[in-house]
Structure formats: C-alpha cells, structure tokens
Amino acid sequence: MRTPVRVFVALLTVAVVAAPVTTSAGSAKHGPPAGETAPPARAAGVVLGSTPATIDDPSNCAPATAAQDVSGPDSPDYTAATAGVITSWSSRIQPIIAVDTAMRLMVFRPDGAGGQTVAALTPLRDLVGGSLNTFPSRIGIAAGDFIGLSFVGSAEVQCRYPGIGDSFVFAFGPNPAVGEPFVGDFDDVAARLNISAVLEPDADRDGYGDLTQDGCPSQPIPNGGACDRTAPQTRLTVKPPAFTRNRQAKFRFVSTERRSTFRCSLDGQAYRRCISPVFRRVSIGQHIFKVAATDRYGNRDRTPAVARWRVRR
Ligand SMILES: [Ca+2]
Ligand SMILES: [Ca+2]
C-alpha cells in the first residue's frame, strides 16, 4: 500500500542565481531539402532545478528522493524564464528506497495572490534506486511557472537542512489535480528539490519541444510530424465554355488542401488574392484566367489551373 501523496513546491522567491544552461545541441530530425538554406541555429534547452551528484545522509530526508542538501550559493532555478515544453525530467534516489516509491513532476502557476495552481503534471513513475532516473515528457510550461514534485512512498518525509539557498515547501494532503489551487501545510526549509527538467522552446506552439520532439519546428504540424513542403494542386470546377456570347465570366475553384488561399490572374494581369467564386465582365475576344492555391504553410501551386475562352459577338 502506498501512503498519501506528498507534494513539494519550490518557492518562487528564492532563486539566487540563474538556471544553468546546457550546451546540448538539439538536432532537427528533418533538415531542409537539398539546395535549401539551413535554418538558423536553434536555442539550446534549459535545465530547471537540479539533481544531486550523489544522495547524502538519508536520515536528513527520508525518503531522500525529495530533497538534497544545500552546499553553496549556486542555487538552481526552478522557475521557467520562458515558455516552452518540458521534454524530460530527472531525479536521483537512494538505493535503499527503491521499493514502493513513485514520483511525478508537477508544474505550478502563480495565481497572483501568493498562491499557485497546478498547471500540469506527469504520470507517477516508478523510481530505480541508486541511479539517476530520467523520464521523457511532453508538457507545456509558461513563463513564470515553476516545477515541483510529488511522490508516493512508504517512508516518512522529514527534511530539515540548515544553510542558505533554494527553499522548498512541502505539504501533506490530497494529490492536487490540474487546474486546482495548490494548498497545503507549507513548511519552508533550506534545501533544494531533487528534481530537474529540460525545457525546450516551442516556437510554433504545437506542444512539441523544438529541439528533440518536433519534426518541423517552423510549422505546427499535427503530432510533431515532418515539415509540409508539398504544394497544393488547384482545380477549376466552373469556368466559361470555350466559345460563348456571354461577357459575364464565372469561375469556381478548389484546392487539394483545406485552408488554402488563392491568387487569380485575368488576361496576364498580376496575381491577386481571390476567393471562389469569382465573377469578371470581359470584352469581346480571347481571354485567359489562372488561379493558384497556397496552402496554410505557404507552399504555392506552381502549376495554376487555367481557363481559356473566346467571347463572340
Ligand atoms: Ca514546436
Ligand atoms: Ca511543428
């Protein structure tokens, strides 16, 4: 049986030094086609929080999954400076408490009144003792949100560290859900949470981290897929007959891709934005109408649909 969930929250007011920035360069899964210029270098991911190199005296904090001692002024930052996606999170735990212990990353959002609500959380993950546990994730985080953790375990939670540095608060009580205010029996102690997370940018706001998860960081492709570089095809469904006495011309046209836009050209004039149907009054003689679709990602149909007709007296 697992005991009630404990929730740990890094305090907002304790950041002393900016979060360390990793230099791990993410690489695009899908580069540009041959002949195209490579996109500009992407920003590196940022590590929020920290995990200790080793776990020290477990009697200070049992289970020692929750906190690590403060050993200097270089406090990690648990708060996200920019919005993005958390693509993994980690915690290192004691070898001796591997049994019946599970943890989750939680994201808290300040409510502007000194409290916070739960913005996101991961599923509970079973922890392997004596090693750094790292779990992939894909959860959005807003600028100003901060990370914390909750866990279930059979041991009591008693964390008391002297010194200065990041504080955290802990609470006993019901496991909060997304959107709920976080309230609990706060207790401020000088220690760091034993949790870290990798924050990647999400420039196209598709919910996929741009460095390692997003097949196309420049387009909000569903499911993080590869870039859409395929042009739509355009088809005229209504056009004048080849020979007519009607000087009023009507056109209807469609694209192979939804949410396309169209550009039209009559008798060699410049292309202009147009919407189906199009009506044009023309003079006696030969005419040509062209229409080309552009998909939502800017791919243009290079082979416009063409109508040619002659208006007789
Ligand atoms: Ca993205
Ligand atoms: Ca994308």
Image (cartoon, rainbow, N blue to C red):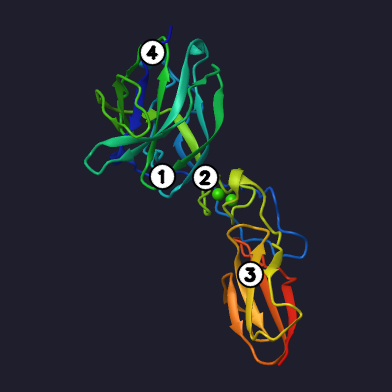
Residue ID for mark 3: 252
Q: Amino acid at mark 3?
A: Arg
Establish if 240 lies above or below 120. Answer: below
Q: Amino acid at mark 4?
A: Ser
For marks 4 and 3 on the same chain, the one whose residue lies earlier in the sequence: 4
Residue ID for mark 2: 207
Q: Nearer the viewer, residue 248 or 10?
A: 248
**Is label 4's Cβ within 8 Å of ligand 1?**
no
Horizontally, residue 86 falls left or right of residue 175, namely right
Tell which tag, 1 or 4, sits nearer the viewer.
Answer: 1
Tell which tag, 3 or 2, sits nearer the viewer.
Answer: 3
Q: Which mark is residue 80?
A: 1
Q: Quadrant of residue 114?
A: top left
- What secondary structure is marked by label 1? loop
Tell which tag, 3 or 1, sits nearer the viewer.
Answer: 3
Horizontally, residue 76 falls left or right of residue 250, namely left
For marks 3 and 2 on the same chain, the one whose residue lies earlier in the sequence: 2
Q: Give the crowd class for mark 3: few <14, some 14-19, many >=20 residues within 10 Å.
A: some
Q: Give the crowd class for mark 1: few <14, some 14-19, many >=20 residues within 10 Å.
A: many
Q: Separation of disc 1 and disc 4 at Cα? A: 31 Å
Write the residue at 61% across / 70% down.
262
Q: Quadrant of residue 78?
A: top left
For marks 4 and 2 on the same chain, the one whose residue lies earlier in the sequence: 4
Q: Position of residue 46 (x, y in %)?
A: 50, 45
Residue ID for mark 4: 59
